[in-house]
Image (cartoon, helix red, strand yellow):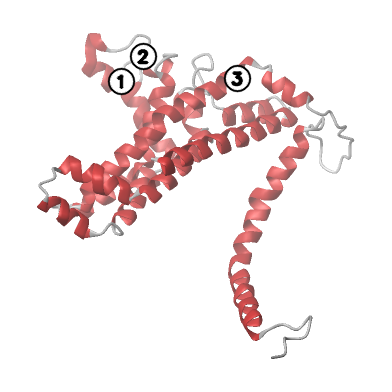
Amino acid sequence: MSSPARGATSPGRLRSLGRNLLGLGFVSPYLAFVAVVFAYPFGFAVWMSFHDYFFTAPNVVVEHPFVGFENYVTVLTDPDVRRSFVNILVFLVINVPLTVFASMVLATALNAKLPMRSFFRAAYYVPYITASVAVVGVWLWLFSSGGLVNQLLGDLAPEPSWLVNETLAMPLIAVFVAWKQLGFFIMLYLAALQNVPKELYESADVDGASTVRKFLSVTVPGVRPATTLVLIVATITGANLFTEPYLLTGGGGPDGSSASPVLLMYQRGIEQGSPDVAAAIGVLLVLFVLVVSLINRKLTERG
């Protein structure tokens, strides 16, 4: 039986190539979007971090000499930058587990047959779609020195108050972000719960398993892919924290205890006119997020 001539393309390969081209045609708009909005800006930020870059007037051409790792040395020796990374690590340690646990538990409850279930599903989603400025105003009213929470606590209220307390400012921001974004992650878990076989719950009922045991033995393993996604998304969004400390604590106060790397990027790049230093902070933040996300994924898959 003669084999196809060298260089000839079999009909199967042609059909496969046609399907691939069709798929590429569908995803090409998104690929172009990613290239323009994400890939190019990140590549330009990496280039800036290795050069002496500064803002100039329009149409003014100046040289930006290569400075090697000078900007990274400036960043790594800056105590404010180091503290901002510690702050964001504290934020993630509080925010990510709280987000995963609360959204999984609430999604499980909202997946059951409850009265007014649709109302509660919508109610948890409302804070996520509400403008951050409006929600921040409510929390400022609740947790200010003369706010409602301190009035209810009376003598038990912390001194200094929540948002001007170096120890409590960042944990409170972590709780606020977890509460505000809870509706989105509940939606992810609700979608994942639809793929958990109901037969597993019926078998657990026959074996006399309690509600907690069914949650730990059936629900948690059944939504593990969603948990991996929630961990990664919560880590990425948390590492990009900016609006909350900027508005709640007046720009990272008190004394930088709630400052985030993204907030410092804004301050260094825009307010102080050092975009090359800000770019170096951004590159280090990307590496930090990659490492933390990989650790979370490995721990989840191993579990």
Residue 172 % position (x, y): 38, 24
Q: Which residue lies at the image location 87% right of the left edge and 39% below the top edge?
A: 60
Q: Which residue lies at the image location 39% right of the left edge and 17% below the top edge?
A: 168
Q: Determine whether the residue tagged by mark 1 lies in a helix, strand or loop.
A: loop
Residue position for label 3: 82
Q: Which one is nearer the viewer's eye here, 119 or 135? A: 119
Of the residues under marks 3 and 2, which one precedes in the sequence?
Answer: 3
Q: Which amino acid type is marked by label 1? A: Gly
Task: Tell me the mark number nearer the camera, choosing from 1 and 2.
Answer: 2
Q: Tell me the crowding category of disc 1: few under 14, some 14 to 19, or many 20 or more residues within 10 angstroms, Cα based.
A: some
Farthest-out residue, bottom: 1
Q: Which residue lies at the image location 64% right of the left edge and 51% below the top edge?
A: 37
Residue 92 % position (x, y): 45, 30
Disc assigned to residue 147: 1
Instruction: Determine whether 219 is above or below 8 in the image.
Output: above
**Left or right placement of residue 6 versus residue 212 in this view:** right
Q: Which residue lies at the image location 36% right of the left edge and 20% below the top edge?
A: 144
Residue 234 % position (x, y): 45, 40
Q: Which amino acid type is marked by label 2? A: Ser
Is residue 123 something one can see in this rendering? Answer: no
Q: Determine whether the residue tagged by mark 2 lies in a helix, strand or loop.
A: loop
Q: Marks 1/2: CA distance? A: 10 Å
